[in-house]
């Protein structure tokens, strides 16, 4: 069902990944408006470690610039449903390389698209494509977000343990659940 498109977009070394109702594609500057609109929502920001609230001017543009940099530490994809009559950006999914064969998955979906299965579809497509060729994938979610935990378990992640992470938007350490997915 999910397959990696072999040709990356011009100027990028990230693949475009087919994900059923949308594609996962590298970010582009024109995504700034929708990303800023979604991440300005306190609920989105508080569901992540790194999105501040309120969102400072220029934060989205800086995020996109980092995501497009050849020296980036994180690969970021937009969930683009425009070919299916959906929004050009439904949300974001990312992979951060921890070590050579380990990566961490992150994701968020715009509030207007919650509870529609987009996060599950994106994470499952990313896992199936495994663009970092990782042997192990990690992820963590805040314990007050059981929907995101279901996204991970639906993608074959196993619960590893409890921890806590700093949330910039909450200005606090927040209890998390950590998950692991061993790859083929």
Image (cartoon, rainbow, N blue to C red):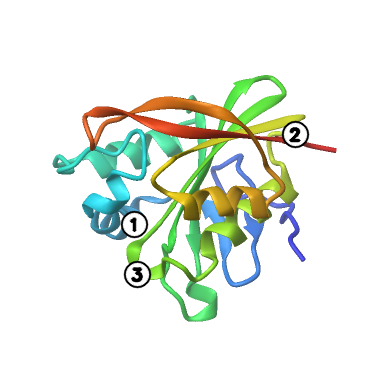
Foreground label between 1 and 2: 2
Callout 3 crowding tier (Cα within 10 Å): few <14, some 14–19, many ≥20: few
Residue under the point 42% across and 66% down: 114
Q: On the rendered image, what quadrant is the N terminus found in?
A: bottom right
Q: How far apart are the alpha carbons under marks 3 and 1?
A: 20 Å
Q: Quadrant of residue 52?
A: top left
Q: How many residues crowd mark 2 within 10 Å: few (<14), some (14–19), many (20+)?
A: some
Q: Which label is found at residue 30?
A: 1
The residue at which mark 3 appears reads as 112
Who comes first in sequence, dot 2 or dot 3?
3
Asked if the residues shown at circle 1 and circle 2 are in contact, with their CB atoms under 8 angstroms apart, the answer is: no
**Front residue (pair 46, 13):** 46
Task: For the C terminus, give its image quadrant.
Answer: top right
Spatial CA distance of label 1 from label 2 is 29 Å
Tell me: residue 46, above or below residue 81. Answer: above
Name which residue lies at 57% across and 54% down: 151
């Amino acid at each position: 069902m999910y397959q990696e498109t072999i040709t990356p977009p011009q100027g990028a070394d990230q693949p475009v990944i087919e994900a059923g109702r949308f594609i996962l594609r590298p970010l582009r500057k024109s995504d700034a408006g929708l990303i800023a609109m979604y991440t300005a929502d306190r609920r989105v920001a508080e569901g992540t470690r790194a999105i501040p609230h309120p969102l400072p001017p220029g934060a989205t543009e800086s995020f996109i610039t980092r995501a497009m940099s050849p020296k980036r530490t994180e690969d970021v994809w937009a969930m683009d449903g425009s070919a299916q009559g959906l929004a050009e950006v439904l949300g974001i999914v990312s992979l951060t390389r921890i070590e050579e064969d380990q990566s961490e998955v992150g994701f968020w979906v715009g509030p207007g698209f919650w509870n529609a299965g987009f996060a599950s579809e994106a994470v499952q497509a990313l896992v199936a494509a495994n663009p970092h060729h990782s042997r192990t994938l990690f992820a963590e979610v805040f314990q007050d977000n059981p929907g995101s935990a279901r996204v991970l378990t639906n993608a074959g992640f196993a619960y590893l343990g409890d921890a806590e992470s700093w949330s910039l938007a909450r200005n606090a350490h927040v209890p998390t659940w950590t998950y692991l997915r061993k790859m083929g």
